[in-house]
């Protein structure tokens, strides 16, 4: 039996591998879009693009976590032989999404007419269109993955990512920032065309179902809003202190952190329908223990060393193809590990919901946000630079991830502090190894990149050996 199957049990590793392959295509397409768009627009216009993406991120929280509640209810309804139950949950969610974000779109369009500068008007109008369209698309994707339609979900993600690559870059090349913003909405519309017949689109507002979904999703939404602020407060500080051009450079560095969040999403997408469905007949404590040891710990042990190696290769690519973003490389080498820490949080939140402890999440996230905001402001006031800013961001994310893992460990009757240290230490180790390798041998050409990678591999050997040990000790879930 393969190590992968022994790690995650029969069938589950195969699904993760299959969807991971699909998701890697999506991330590659979006990554290429980000890198090429940065080159097409230049730092200042790319800084405005970063503000556009931030506006969509923050605007999404107006949904109050409704779709997180939809995930749980639809996944649980898979045990029911009546498909109309799932469709009813979907219709209520669709109605709420249209009402909420339709209203926000109208108000944002009106605000655009009051903006004093042309770029601000353009930004507001683009956000108005993009937010409603993106939320409708996200509703459809959420319903599909919660229903277990993983293959259709993966295909639609690839379609949307391909449309994003083609439309955003083509229109951005022809018409600059305006074209890129229009291309974003055009690409989302392409994805929406695939939803009819796959998800319920006839909206309705059912008070009981709406209340049930919000009861689950609202605490998570508040926590995720605070987490978004935690993830973006340093960018806001850079923009306020150093201007749009510096924000464009820093946004380029930050973009590499998405690898950790995306990898966590791959695992989460595959396992959450089964995990939530098992809540109907299994003990939550045993499920959370299994999740910590069989999902979160291997995730960190595998991804942390890969992230460091990837950032060294990225250094070579930037040096050869995008030299004007060379100043972003050092903060990027640090910042990539915030994505892994945030990925841990995303996976741990599944277990928090399974244990019914989601009400505690906003307090933990608020504490991390305040710490990150104070540290980021202090870093800029003292003039310590972007590398120091990225370092404090990693520290804040690790502290946040540690608090959430400790919350899960408590629910699983495991020692909280020891569990957090056992899961998170590879991130700290690999971050140090990456910083050391990139400083001693900057990967500016192929020979120096090869030497840096070889030294890095030696430095992360303890992490790789631990990964092998964990995989060998693992046993199938159904083999006890």
Image (tube, rainbow, N blue to C red):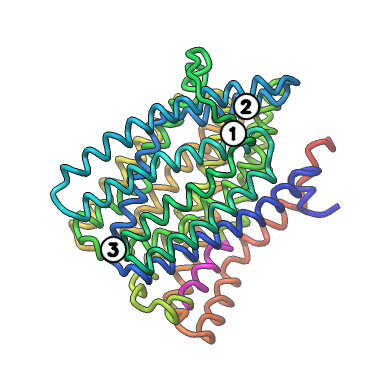
CB-based contact (under 8 Å), mark 2 and mark 3: no
Q: CA distance from mark 1 to mark 3?
A: 35 Å
Chief SS of the magenta region: helix
- The answer to which of 53 and 368 lies nearer the viewer is 53
Q: Give the percent coordinates (x, y) of residue 254.
A: 39, 59
Q: CA distance from mark 1 to mark 2?
A: 7 Å
Left or right of 137 in this view: 414:
right
Q: CA distance from mark 2 to mark 3?
A: 41 Å
Classify mark 1: helix, strand or loop.
Answer: helix
Residue 422 appears in view? no
Q: For label 3, count other residues whose C-alpha is less than 10 Å away and answer few (under 14), some (14-19) or many (20+).
A: many
Mark 3, residue position: 45
Q: Give the percent coordinates (x, y) of residue 166.
A: 49, 62
Q: Which mark is residue 74?
A: 2
Q: Residue furthest top?
A: 208
- The answer to which of 392 and 19 lies nearer the viewer is 19
Mark 1, residue position: 143
Query: Residue drawn 33% across and 57% down?
Result: 49
Classify mark 2: helix, strand or loop.
Answer: helix
Which range of residues does the magenta coloring cover? 305-316
Query: Is 308 covered by the magenta stretch?
Result: yes
CB-based contact (under 8 Å), mark 1 and mark 2: yes
Q: Earlier in the sequence, mark 1 or mark 2?
A: 2
Query: Residue drawn 59% across and 27% down?
Result: 72
Q: For label 1, count other residues whose C-alpha is less than 10 Å away and answer few (under 14), some (14-19) or many (20+).
A: many
Q: Earlier in the sequence, mark 2 or mark 3?
A: 3
């Amino acid at each position: 039996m393969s190590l992968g199957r022994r790690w995650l049990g029969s069938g589950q590793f195969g699904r993760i591998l299959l969807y991971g392959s699909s998701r890697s295509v999506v991330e590659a397409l979006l990554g290429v879009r980000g890198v090429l768009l940065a080159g097409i627009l230049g730092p200042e216009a790319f800084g405005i693009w970063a503000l556009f993406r931030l506006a969509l991120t923050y605007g999404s929280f107006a949904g109050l976590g409704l779709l997180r509640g939809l995930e749980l209810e639809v996944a649980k309804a898979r045990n029911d032989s009546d498909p109309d139950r799932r469709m009813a949950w979907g219709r209520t969610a669709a109605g709420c999404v249209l009402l909420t974000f339709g209203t926000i779109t109208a108000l944002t369009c009106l605000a655009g007419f009051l903006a004093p500068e042309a770029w601000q008007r353009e930004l507001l109008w683009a956000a108005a269109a993009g937010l409603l369209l993106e939320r409708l698309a996200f509703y459809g994707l959420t319903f599909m993955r919660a229903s277990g339609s993983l293959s259709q979900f993966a295909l639609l993600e690839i379609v949307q990512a391909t449309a994003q690559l083609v439309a955003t870059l083509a229109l951005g090349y022809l018409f600059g920032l305006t074209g890129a913003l229009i291309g974003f909405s055009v690409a989302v519309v392409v994805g929406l065309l695939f939803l009819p017949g796959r998800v319920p689109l006839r909206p309705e507002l059912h008070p009981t179902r709406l209340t049930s979904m919000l009861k689950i999703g609202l605490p998570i939404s508040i926590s995720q809003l605070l987490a978004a602020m935690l993830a973006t407060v340093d960018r806001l500080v850079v923009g306020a202190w150093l201007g749009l051009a510096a924000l464009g450079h820093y946004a380029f560095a930050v973009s590499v952190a998405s690898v950790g969040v995306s990898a966590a999403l791959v695992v989460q997408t595959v396992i959450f329908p089964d995990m939530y469905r098992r809540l109907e007949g299994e003990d939550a404590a045993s499920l959370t223990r299994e999740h910590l040891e069989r999902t979160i710990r291997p995730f960190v042990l595998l991804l942390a060393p890969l992230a460091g190696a990837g950032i060294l290769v990225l250094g070579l690519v930037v040096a050869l193809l995008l030299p004007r973003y060379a100043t972003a490389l050092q903060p990027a080498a640090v910042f990539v590990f915030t994505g892994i820490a945030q990925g841990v949080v995303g996976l741990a939140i599944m277990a928090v919901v399974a244990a019914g402890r989601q009400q505690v999440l906003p307090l933990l996230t608020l504490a991390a946000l305040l710490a990150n905001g104070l540290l980021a402001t202090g870093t800029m006031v003292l003039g310590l630079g972007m590398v120091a800013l990225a370092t404090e961001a990693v520290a804040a994310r690790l502290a946040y991830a540690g608090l959430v893992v400790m919350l899960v460990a408590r629910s699983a009757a495991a020692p909280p502090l020891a569990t957090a240290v056992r899961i998170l230490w590879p991130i700290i180790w690999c971050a140090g190894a990456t910083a050391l390798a990139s400083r001693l041998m900057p990967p500016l050409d192929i020979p120096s990149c090869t030497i840096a990678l070889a030294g890095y591999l030696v430095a992360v050997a303890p992490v790789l050996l631990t990964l092998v040990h964990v995989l060998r000790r693992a046993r199938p879930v159904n083999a006890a």
